[in-house]
Amino acid sequence: MKLVLKVILQLRAVVTTCLFIIATAFLSALGVTMNILFNRRRLDNWIMTTWGNLSCKIFNVELKTYGAENLKRGQGAVLLFNHASFMDILAICGALYNVRFGAKIELFKIPVFGACMRRFGTLPISRGNREEVFKVYEEAKIRFARGERFALSPEGGRFHAEQLLPFKAGPFVFGINSQVPLIPVVIKGAYEVWPKGKMLANSDRWKRTIEVHVLEPVSTEGFTTKDRTVLQDKIYKAMNAVYIAPMN
């Protein structure tokens, strides 16, 4: 019986992953087309929210959001999230509104894919070019003023461990230079749905749950980059406490 169930789950995972790829391709094409024709952030937001929620439904994942009231409408902010799985991106898109992501600048050089990321407002992150970094900071200030939010991973990549890894300085310097709130976001259960390195999502259980916890904003007002470690320590402790706690 266990073997039969395992085979069924694997077959379902193949089908749902293929459906996800088709849905992603369709929504990407639709989103880019609407962006070219209308260039409205509201339409971009609708595409991203639909992509996130539809993907969770395809993989039979229940998405639960806590603390969404901590996101004030029209207020620019830097969202700091723990990143262990590609499902983190889908969960944030489905649970939270008007969020853009940061991505390594090398990804923007990929034909078509890079153009799509630019169209959807993804922030290019250059780690080795100081001039490019400051150029991005200045561009972001304008977008923050329009109420946009950028989600960045303070751990610096995809990692899964019993506790959060030490945070990098970049996202905190970004928030301080722009003088916008830092909003911690803890994602739980995403790694179990789609572990890093696996081709198929949710291949070992019929249904799973992902929790998105939006913690209270931390103001950067009056802080300078010399004070960033104070913010790093404060936010790390707050996020790690939620991260290691059992799921609801």
Image: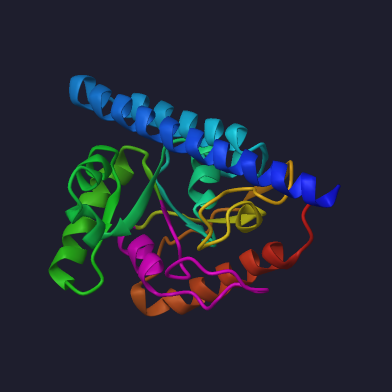
| Residue 39 in picture, x, y percent from top left | 23, 26
Residue ID at (45%, 62%) = 153
Q: As rendered, which of 5 and 37 lies closer to the eye? A: 5
Q: Report the magenta stretch's main SS.
A: loop
**Residue 56, magenta (yes or no):** no
Tell me if residue 126 comes above or below residue 7 in the rendering. below
Tell me if residue 151 comes above or below residue 159 in the rendering. above
Residue ID at (30%, 63%) = 177
User: Is residue 211 found left or right of 175 in the rendered image?
Assistant: right
| Residue 68 in picture, x, y percent from top left | 61, 40
How many labels, in total? 0
Q: As rendered, which of 117 and 178 lies closer to the eye? A: 117
Which color scheme does this rendered protein use? Answer: rainbow
User: Is residue 230 found left or right of 211 in the rendered image?
Assistant: left
Residue ID at (60%, 43%) = 13
Q: As rendered, which of 220 and 61 lies closer to the eye? A: 61
Read off the magenta span. 151-178
| Residue 121 in picture, x, y percent from top left | 28, 42
Look at the image and tell me whether residue 215 can be seen: no
Q: Residue furthest right?
A: 1
| Residue 210 in picture, x, y percent from top left | 66, 47
Look at the image and tell me whether residue 125 can be seen: yes
Residue ID at (67%, 48%) = 211
**Residue 176, magenta (yes or no):** yes
User: Is residue 67 found left or right of 85 in the rendered image?
Assistant: right
